[in-house]
Amino acid sequence: MGLSRRDFIKACAAAAAFAAAGASVARPEWAEAAEDGITWGKAPCRYCGVGCSVLVGVKGGRIVSTKGDPAGPVNKGLNCIKGYFLSKALYGKDRLTTPLIRKGNRMVEASWDEALDLIAAQYKKAIAEHGPDSVALYGSGQWTIQEGYVASKLMKGGIGTNNLEPNARLCMASAVVAFMNTFGSDEPMGCYDDLDLGDTYVLWGANMAEAHPVLFSRLIDNKLKHPKVKLIDIATRRTRTTKMADEFIAIKPHGDLAALNAIIHVILRDKLYDEAFVAKHVSFKRGKENAPYGLKDKEAFNETPADVKNLSFEEYKALMKPYTPQWAQKVSGIPAAKIEELARVYGDKSRKVNSLWTMGVNQHSRGVWVNNLIYNLHLLTGKICKPGENPLSLTGQPSACGTAREVGTFAHRLPADMVVMNEAHRKKAAGIWGVPAEKIPAKVGLHTVEMFRAIDRGELKCIWIQCTNPFQSLPNLNRVRKAAQSRKAFIVVSDIYPTRSTELADVVLPSASWVEKEGVFGNTERRTQQWFKMVNAPGKSKEDVWQLIEFAKRMGHGALFPYPEKGMHRAIFEEYRKFTLGTGKDLAPYGTYAKVRGLRWPVKANGTETRWRYTEADDEHVAKGEGIKFYKAPNNKVSAWFRPYEPPAEVPDRNYPFWFCTGRLLEHWHTGTMTGRVPELRRAVSQATVELHPEDAKRLGIRNRDQVRITSRRGSIVLTAEIGGRGTPERGSVFTTFFDEKKLVNEICIDAFDPLSKEPDFKKCAVKVQKA
Ligand SMILES: Nc1nc2c(c(=O)[nH]1)N[C@H]1C(S)=C(S)[C@@H](COP(=O)(O)OP(=O)(O)OC[C@H]3O[C@@H](n4cnc5c(=O)[nH]c(N)nc54)[C@H](O)[C@@H]3O)O[C@H]1N2
Ligand SMILES: Nc1nc2c(c(=O)[nH]1)N[C@H]1C(S)=C(S)[C@@H](COP(=O)(O)OP(=O)(O)OC[C@H]3O[C@@H](n4cnc5c(=O)[nH]c(N)nc54)[C@H](O)[C@@H]3O)O[C@H]1N2
Ligand code: SF4
Ligand SMILES: [Mo]
């Protein structure tokens, strides 16, 4: 598995030395090798969705080193800069070490019993007075699978509310809805091998060089080895990714919706599609249109089966007629000739084409539609489920796939693609959980934006936040923070450091993180990766799953969690695994994951992994002779949706003439709580800046490093100008990051969201830009 002979011999020698020297000390369960007094174990990186495998070196009860794992098939020994400094993220001077309880404006140290008793009393009171839907739990795609599973069982099967959400609502929700309404099952058919095997890569709004660095280096490796490989970067901003691309195509914000429709128009007009593939595998559909933007509280929009119209291929072609390249040029800013060219790239039978996308597409008020249209390109041309040619939706967090999506910690979901609205699904979940089926409510819970609006409205009385920092990362942040400050709800925050969220909490709980506990993550390519606990967490810190189970006991739901203290993580995983078997999302026994560098599901009966789903060549759920079979889709036919152009929620005007976009940079992780405590990373990038186009800056009289005031209808903030730095936005737009806790950038962001996925659009709103 990518382990070179040299590495292998080295590892064996080290293991032998370890065995000899270790006669007196018991070898820890996690130890794979030892040298120079350092014991090494394996773990996936705790940051991004690439899911690199790292070797963690422990000496004297502390992590002393981490290094890229040569045996890790994802990264083959590589790490990005965040990976290199992983251990330091846990050793900031101000780690939380004891529970804290609010007494007026002060936070007072407390015991776990005091803190948990108080939380349980508050939750019980709220439930008694206002019912179970007055409480909530807000979690994370950085939760382990065990944490997410326990959270779901407790909230949905115990307390009896679907008010459970992950921060992945801000991230992957649009991708999830499109996977479900196109293929009938979440997560990609392809995998990272496609980055080694293809020859054409089209990026739609992804800055892979900074957000998925090791994966990007894998793609670049392919490009350097094979001259045919072409990389096309379609984005609203020039980035480090652009520098490595063969071609940069600038689009206007939201312009993808027009450009994709026009590319499809040309593919249909010039008959560049694969007639046989379409006839065998695709059914055309039209959904609900004139969708709202979620700007009003409690605004409801769903696409029910009654709203969906089936179309013949001819009807679909007729609907696509108006979307000409000339029309799209006006809306997207991409020249009509370029759109024709892109259509020929996708239609070229001699090219293995891959589309890759991340938040440029998902954080979009029509994000589901854009995902749908990207799939249409691959469905029409038949470039799907084949080694080296696939659409690949990139995931952001280390376990957005494994935990948020597979375990199903969204307000409408249950494990393994099941949903709370479906009676048979509720019955299956209730059966495995050992609770009456009526216990799991059929009513979808509050989605993230509504959950925090409900605090403002006084409807939500208690919320527990774990492994996420919403009072920095939510959109329209002023409203959300004011609601919390008004103390209308009882707020619990479990974190490892003081944050902009812990400062608003009534109870702060110190958590164990990463290798201070045992866990499992699932990455972008369906790879499930396990690790053991290697060091103790500081002070009284306890892992999130322990916190939840202790709370459950106080709530009278202890019987749901009958796991032994030793082997708890294994027992939770084995119970969860029952949901997956036979569904096409099949997982291996826990013990298998303990031994390997992850496996991609569905795991086969013989214990091997699946690289390409839905294909006879690799997926056990497709019988020999069936070729490609979309076995999770109705009648085995995937849906190609007609999705019209509709404008964005807010567009620049005379008063707010600039587009405002937010995103990431290499050195920092989201709200900066961890990377901000790594001296090397903090020194590299110490504060958020605002990127401007040089011509805009000149016109406004702004020079590099000047202070600039950015104002939207929701907030105002002063940032240092960055002109000609590593990123350059297109004219008429500015860009910034959200890692800097001193600059609450999200106060500017609009809380408009995609009505199907409820994922907010952090990529566009209108602002004023002035020299401060
Ligand atoms: N270093 C680092 N890496 C990370 C993270 C991190 O915090 N730091 N976070 C991880 C997570 S959770 C995520 S979700 C990913 C995000 O990964 P990415 O999505 O790649 O990163 P972003 O910087 O959020 O946004 C990428 C691009 O969206 C494009 N964009 C803006 N508006 C539009 C539009 O209207 N249409 C299109 N098509 N594109 C548009 C812009 O060009 C922008 O550069 O990164 C993951 N990796
Ligand atoms: N402006 C803007 N805002 C955005 C986005 C954007 O592009 N622009 N992107 C959105 C996206 S895609 C995402 S994924 C979100 C991410 O937003 P958040 O999830 O709010 O950001 P993180 O910084 O990842 O927060 C994780 C928190 O968990 C803590 N932590 C670390 N390990 C543990 C642990 O084991 N247990 C516990 N209990 N805590 C732990 C960390 O210290 C940190 O405070 O941001 C969203 N917000
Ligand atoms: S690319 Fe992602 S998973 Fe790999 S080391 Fe960097 S942050 Fe960690
Ligand atoms: Mo994300």
Image: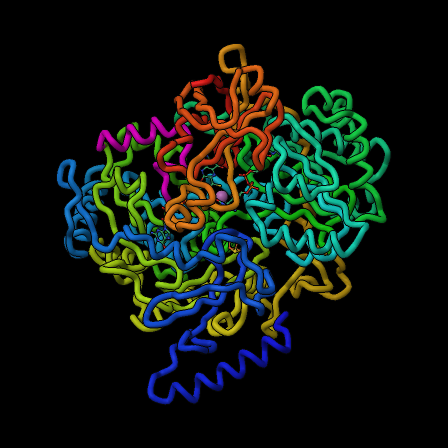
Question: Does 589 appear above or below 651?
Answer: below
Work out whether 609 lies above or below 186. below
Q: Position of residue 277 (x, y in %)?
A: 79, 48
Ligand 1: quadrant of the figure: top right
Which span is picked out in magenta?
468-487
64 to the left or right of 728: left
Image height check: is 710 above or below 112? above
Report whether 728 appears left or right of 716: right
Which picture quadrant has residue 481? top left
Q: Please, which residue is most extreme toward the top here?
A: 654
Work out whether residue 186 or residue 557 is closer to the camera in this orientation and state it.
186
Q: Nearer the viewer, residue 402 or 101?
A: 101
In magenta stretch: residue 35: no
Residue occupying image coordinates x 49% and y 32%: 736
Instruction: Name the residue located 57 percent from the left edge and 31 percent from the top edge.
Output: 366
Measuring from the top left, give residue 283's x and y in whole percent.
Answer: 71, 41
Q: How many marks?
A: 0
Where does the N terminus fall, quadrant-wise?
bottom right
**Image point 27% across, 63% down: which residue?**
559
Front-most of residues 271 and 159: 271
Quadrant, the C terminus? top left
Q: Position of residue 60 (x, y in %)?
A: 33, 72
Say whether residue 665 is left or right of residue 613: left
The residue closer to the viewer here, 478 or 447, is 478
The dominant secondary structure in magenta is: helix
- Residue 464 position, x and y percent, is 29, 45
Compared across the picture, whether 673 is left or right of 262 comes to left
Which residue is drawn at the image coordinates 14% and 36% (left, top)?
104
Instruction: Work out whether 198 lies above or below 746.
Output: below
Examine the rendering and report whether any part of residue 601 can be seen: no
